[in-house]
Amino acid sequence: MFVSGILIVSTVTFVSWLMHIEQGRNVFRRNMNQYVSYLVKDLGSPPNRVQAEKLSKKLFINIHYQSPETSWKTSGTLPSLEQYEFRKLKTNRSIDFGRNPFIKDRVFRVKNGDQVLYIFYQREKISETGWMLGIILAVAILFLIFLTYLALRWVLQPVHWLSGGVEALAQGQLEHRVRSDRHDELGRLARGFNRMAERISTMLSARKQLLLDVSHELRSPITRMKVALEMMPGDSLRKNLEEDLLMLESMVTEILETSRLESQNGRLNIHQLDVVKMVKNVLEHYSEGKPEIVLKESPESLELMADPEQLRIVLENLLNNARRFSDDASNPIEVSISRREDQAVLSVRDYGVGIATEEQNMIFEPFYQIDKSRFRDSNHYGLGLNLCRTIIEAHDGSLRVESEEGSGSTFFLEIPMNLQSKD
């Protein structure tokens, strides 16, 4: 708005100046012929020097007269005539008009035979009052534009609040509310947004609570089913039922663990942990199976404060997913450990099918699954990565992914080195 205001003021000033110049030129052409004619008549023929000096003082002009017999001028400091470019005055072809491109003086030349009369005049300078009025006008216009900007900013402030609210909701901050103390249309829109956010938060809380209640209730039947399975003969049916029951028990455990960590009473069992030693210990259990899993790069040791069991769950989930989305002939899965300032960074890189860009933010949501036809094992419910993210965020860290379809994925765990125990 300021740039627009300055451009508007500059444009108006420039156009006004052009109009003033053009109008001045028209006035100049119309009146200069008569003005010079009166001067020549008052000076007489030949020009009277005494009269010329009087007119020079009265009209602020300088007069220079040349003839074969004599030459005089009313001022001894007139510029050289060689500096002027002369042209005929359009309103009177007998009068020549000359201008000097380097100074502000102008000169008229009137010839009468071998007599030449030069009349010098100096353009009037714009008075300081005129400049001040122009500056005050420009400042006043800019000040009005500034007031307009403040008014528009105040009117559109709820749009800024709504933009921040939408961004907060997109990041999962369901408790965020926008200011709604305005009583105009935008204020009603802000209140409508808050009601929508409240409804979404209530719906998600109800869904999460329902899932948690169902998971709690499932633990008892699962335990009874495990006891009943122990009494069945060891055939293929029992094996299949045990696998289904194990998967169901794992799903319930992940749901309850995620809920525990997200609750206010959820706690981490924080200990001093050598993450390099922990990773190597986990990789020993993945020595068999394809594709191979290797520790690509790592310091000799890297100690931090963390919950060892929870980090083990995260690492195992990521390794299982890496194998799940890779073929047996894929390149080895690479695990790397490094330190970046005050954070420990652990990455798991696979060379599997990869994840589409539009799905990369969704894979951490509970029960979200990539197209089952793209990988070999479909006996999963999309809870693992959600649990991993919850565990890492409980450590004040972050879990992110970089992936390209057909080239594999890399998951990065970033955990603060100096995490304090949370009571």
Image (cartoon, grey):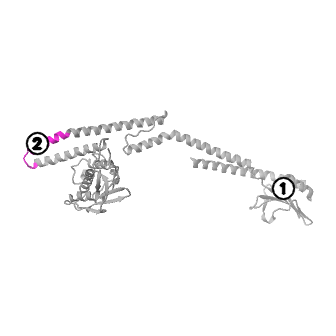
Q: Residue furthest top?
A: 183
Q: Percent from the top left, x then y, of residue 364? A: 31, 48
- 361 left or right, relative to 323: right
Residue 61, numbered circle: 1
Q: In this orientation, which residue lies closer to the viewer: 384 or 259? A: 259
The magenta-colored residue range is 218-236
Question: Where does the image place residue 155, in percent across and percent down from the top left?
Answer: 52, 39
Residue 102 vertical placement versus 307 (above, below) = below
Residue type for callout 1: Ile
Disc 1 crowd, CA 10 A, few/some/many (<14, 14-19, 20+): some
For badge 2, the amino acid type reads Ala
Disc 2 and disc 1: Cα gap in Å?
A: 124 Å
The stretch drawn in magenta includes residue 231: yes
For residue 228, the mark is 2
Point out the tag, 2 or 1, that comes first from the N-terminus.
Answer: 1
Nearer mark to the viewer, of 2 and 1: 2
Expressed as whole percent of the image width and height from the top left, the position of residue 339 reads 35, 59
Label 2 SS? helix
What residue lies at 10% left-to-right and 45% top-to-bottom? 230
Residue at the image position 92 percent from the left and 56 percent from the top: 50
Is 315 on the left or on the right of 142, as rendered?
left
Residue 231: give x, y in percent of width and height: 8, 44
Could you say whether the residue bearing mark 1 is in a helix, strand or loop?
A: strand
Between 48 and 61, the one nearer to me in the picture: 61
Q: Quadrant of residue 150?
A: top right
- The image quadrant that residue 90 belongs to is bottom right
